[in-house]
Image (cartoon, grey):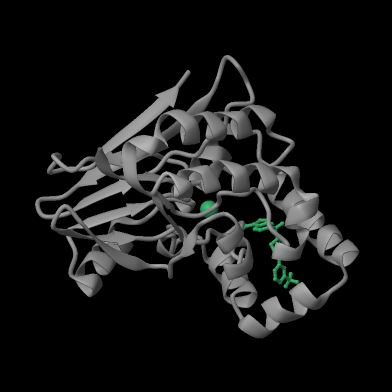
């Protein structure tokens, strides 16, 4: 039985029924081969408080899928993403997940591995980093979570709608991909600061293995299985025997 597998950026919501179903299949058929499942953020498309979980069918299905894994003896770690940063201990516990700080260092097969969602690495996206500094303030989070559900939902819907407004021009699209990627410099800084040679993260939706002469950085894929002809999902496998982690991306 393999050691560890990693997923991130599933962006689960009832509005994405095929992606949700793929996650359930993954939990049934693939995850049980591992001792641990590490979820590196953006498991959910949006999260406006643990008190909304009972009214969220996607959250209820995630609970039943993950609890089954926990009952089979898996350790399920969870690092919050920029979408589900308000997911707290209460929901994590219901889903059998152990919340982990961002970043955190895990020892895997004798290697110290830096795990992070990845949004903090995107230093060229100054607009996003400014927004992040505001919504990461504990008092702001507390006030948001105290607000009536209707207000939270309205605010969240408006923010999601605004971020969905995308350019249809190829050049602008290419620029955004670069702006929202991880600069090699910030990755190098994190490797130095944390004294590790391995880093695993998601967030950029640009799955890849980035090698330098002494570091390995693996970026997880996002999941989108809504369009039958153009699906994508995947994970990172780090088996007991394997020296190196392996990125597995299924895309059509
Ligand atoms: C999460 C993102 C929507 C990016 C708002 C304080 C505020 C929390 C919040 C509201 C939005 C999370 C909680 C969501 C991430 C988006 C759109 C783009 C780029 C406040 C605390 F505004 F009142 F200060 N939010 N939701 N985005 O819908 O899940 O990260 S969300
Ligand atoms: Mn993200």
The residue furthest bottom is 139
Percent across and percent down for residue 217 are 26, 50
The residue furthest top is 229
* Total count of labels: 0
Viewer can see residue 49: no
**Left or right: 131, with 247 as reference point:** right
Q: Quadrant of the N terminus?
A: top left
Percent across and percent down for residue 224 are 57, 32
**Left or right: 76, with 129 as reference point:** left
- Residue at coordinates 49% horizontally, 39% vertically from top-left? 222
Percent across and percent down for residue 184 are 29, 56
**Left or right: 94, with 194 as reference point:** right
The residue furthest left is 213
Near-viewer residue (88 or 141): 88
Viewer can see residue 173: yes
Residue 100 image-quadrant placement: bottom left
Percent across and percent down for residue 201 are 38, 52
Q: Is residue 14 above or below residue 152?
A: above
- Residue at coordinates 88% horizontally, 70% vertically from top-left? 148
- Residue at coordinates 54% horizontally, 48% vertically from top-left? 67
Near-viewer residue (166 or 142): 142
């Amino acid at each position: 039985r393999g050691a560890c597998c990693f997923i991130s950026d599933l962006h689960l919501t009832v509005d994405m029924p095929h992606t949700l179903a793929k996650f359930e299949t993954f939990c049934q058929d693939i995850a049980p081969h591992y001792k641990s499942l590490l979820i590196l953020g953006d498991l959910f498309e949006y999260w406006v408080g643990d008190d909304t979980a009972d009214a969220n069918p996607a959250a209820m299905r995630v609970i039943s899928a993950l609890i089954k894994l926990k009952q089979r003896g898996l350790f399920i770690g969870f690092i919050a993403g920029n979408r589900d940063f308000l997911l707290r201990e209460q929901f994590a516990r219901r889903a059998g997940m152990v919340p982990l700080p961002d970043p955190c260092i895990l020892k895997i097969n004798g290697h110290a591995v830096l795990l992070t969602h990845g949004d903090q690495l995107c230093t060229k996206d100054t607009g996003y980093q400014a927004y992040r500094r505001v919504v990461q303030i504990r008092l702001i989070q507390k006030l948001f979570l105290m607000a009536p559900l209707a207000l939270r939902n309205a605010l969240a819907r408006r923010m999601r709608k605004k971020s969905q407004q995308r350019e249809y021009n190829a050049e602008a699209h290419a620029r955004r991909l670069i702006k929202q990627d991880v600069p090699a410099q910030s990755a190098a800084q994190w490797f130095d600061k944390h004294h590790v040679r391995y880093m695993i993260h998601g967030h950029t939706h640009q799955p890849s293995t980035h090698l330098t002469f002494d570091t390995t950085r693996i970026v997880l894929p996002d999941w989108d299985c809504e369009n039958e002809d153009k699906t994508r999902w995947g994970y990172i496998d780090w088996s007991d025997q394997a020296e190196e982690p392996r990125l597995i991306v299924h895309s059509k």
